[in-house]
Image (cartoon, grey):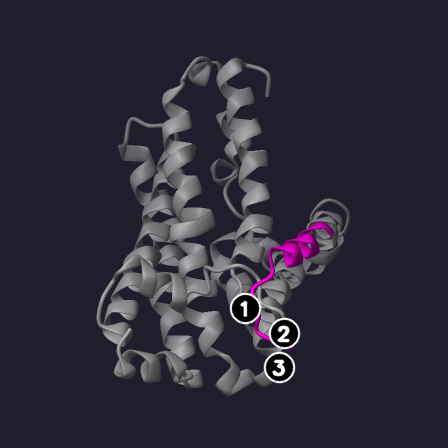
Amino acid sequence: MSETTSTQSNEQYSLGKILGIWAIVSLPLVLATRLIVPLIVPHINLHPGIVYWWIMILGMAWQFVVSMWIVYREEGDLRWATIRCRFWLNKPRDPKTGESKARLFWWLVPGSLLTAVIGFVLADYIDAPLAWLFPSLATPLYSDLSQLSTPEFLGAWWLMGIFLVSFAFNYFLGEEFLFRGVLLPKMKGVFGKWDWVANAVLFGLYHIHWAPSMLSIIVMGLPGIWLSRRFRSNWMYIIIHGVEGLMTFVAILGIILGMA
């Protein structure tokens, strides 16, 4: 990597740039899911849940495009080595020595358990005040994939193809590239040692299209994002976040097999 590229890689973002990148990927998705989907659903011969799902995938694919554009502007190329370095796609590093150590992945055990407790036990309580104060922000029923559990999708194995595309952008190429890859390494200049908290907040607010769940998404993201920041390895949160995708896989499989 060139000297110029290395210098660019060390530059931190301003608050305006951080919020600008957030807006570029968040606002189009809000517009699409809250306004465009309700307008087009009555005129398309597809289940509303499928329409919503594809719009979500397009929104996450847009994050990938924005991420690649930013990396190219900052680093000058899109080689895997460049992306890997810029996005912290490396083994965890000891915070004191900077040495890469695979055994630090054991931190995923408590991180995953804490995330699971928040998601399965505390999420409803965390989200209750927001849902009570702003009932108009409730998401439409078709935004819940469980609504696909109808005879129409029994044996519909093509749903698994949509899931695989969705999984790739949701848990790696889209959300993770943008929020943990592009933003997290560049937020310390503004937020200091609390950059991981700010990243979790931005990630939660990005889910304004799922407004009632924003608070629990913020809290659920804290353990994994802290691990990514502390050990300068975004594989930590990618793995924790990806477990959610495995549960979605089981749900889609159940829909296809008529077991949901």
- Residue 189: image x %, image y %? 49, 86
Q: Are marks 3 and 1 in contact (CB under 8 Å)?
A: no
Give the label, 2 or 1, closer to the camera.
Answer: 2
Indicate which disc, 2 or 3, sits on the residue closer to the N terminus: 2
The residue indicated by pointer 2 is 95
- Real-space CA distance between mark 2 and mark 3, rounded to the nearest whole angstrom: 13 Å
Q: CA distance from mark 3 to mark 1?
A: 13 Å
Q: In the visual, does 116 lie left or right of 20?
A: right
Q: Which mark is residue 193?
A: 3
Q: Which residues are magenta?
A: 96-109
Taking the spot 74% from the left edge, 53% from the top edge, the residue there is 110
Above or below 132: residue 160? above
Foreground residue, 49 or 242? 242
Label 2 with label 1: CB-CB less than 8 Å: yes
Q: Nearer the viewer, residue 113 or 48?
A: 113
Q: Which mark is residue 250?
A: none
Residue 17 location in percent, x, y?
Answer: 37, 80
The residue drawn where x is 62% and y is 81% is: 193
Residue lying at 56% horizontally and 64% vertically, measured from the top left? 100
The residue at which mark 1 appears reads as 232
Pinpoint residue 115: horizontal percent, then vertical percent. Answer: 69, 52
- 127 inside magenta stretch: no
Which amino acid, mark 3? Lys
Amino acid marked by disc 1? Arg
